[in-house]
Image (tube, rainbow, N blue to C red):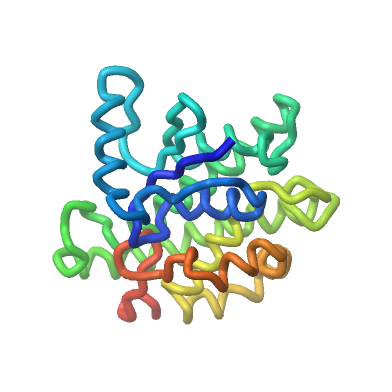
Amino acid sequence: MRYELYYWPTIQGRGEFVRLALEEAGADYVDVARGRGGVPAMMKLIEQTRAGRPPFAPPFLKAGKMVIAQTANILLYLGPRLSLSPRDEAGRLWTHQFQLTISDFVAEIHDAHHPISSALYYEEQRAAAKRSSAELWKHRVPKFLRYFERVLENSGGNFVLGRKLSYVDLSLFQVVEGLRYAFPKRMKRFERRLPRVLALHDRVARRPRIAAYLASKRRIPFNEWGIFRRYKELDR
């Protein structure tokens, strides 16, 4: 099957978690909105599905006649089909549970620089963002990343689920990459507490298809329009 991924063409954002899974699996896919006329095509598809089962917003994936939205939901669908999650129900739900936890974490990271409203520019909420970012690093980053550090300690292998790579490992890789971009100083100080998470990050980065993807033009650079944004005054 050829998959069609629909997401904004200039940011990694939540679509990147899906891209990493498709790239690792060597799946046949097209990143529709990055092609000529892609954004209008994406918006047209949203309009066409409004009377049926419309996605709220990108990212969404077209697989045959199905349109599947929400990052974690897309990965739940793709996981067993791309050999990136177990095929049994208990295993798939366990993997999905991890991804939902990552989704919660990603939302909190985004809200650190937009704590009042996503509809406002960063400059309109700078003071609140400073306080929010300080609280993020005092309480929430340690809580989430130490959780995954414990999971990896008890996994019985090199990956979150044990001996086999899953889409959760790819998503954790992206979280580490994003935090290193957005908060290089804070992350550098905190990394010594995360030997297993960082080893996982490096293990994923060395995988042939991921390494090739990261070095290609398909990998959109981090910028100040996505989830992970670098504002120097927030990185103390």
Which residue is at the front of the view, 161 or 82?
82
Which residue ends up furthest to the front in the rendered image? Answer: 36
Residue 236 point in image, percent of width and height: 39, 80
Callout count: 0
Residue at screen point 17% across, 52% down: 119
Q: Position of residue 91 (x, y in %)?
A: 73, 32
**Nearer to the camera, 177 or 234:** 177
Quadrant housing the N terminus: top right
201 vs 29: above or below: below
Q: Position of residue 166 (x, y in %)?
A: 69, 47
Who's the residue at 54% across and 44% down the image?
Answer: 101
Q: Nearer the viewer, residue 75 or 10?
A: 10
Picture residue at 31% right of the left edge, 69% below the top? 224
Q: Position of residue 141 (x, y in %)?
A: 51, 61
Q: Residue at x 70, y 24 (%)?
A: 89
The outermost residue toward the top is: 52
Left or right of 84, for residue 71: left
Residue 179 in the image: above or below residue 170: below
Which quarter of the picture shows residue 183? bottom left
Q: Is residue 103 above or below residue 180?
A: above
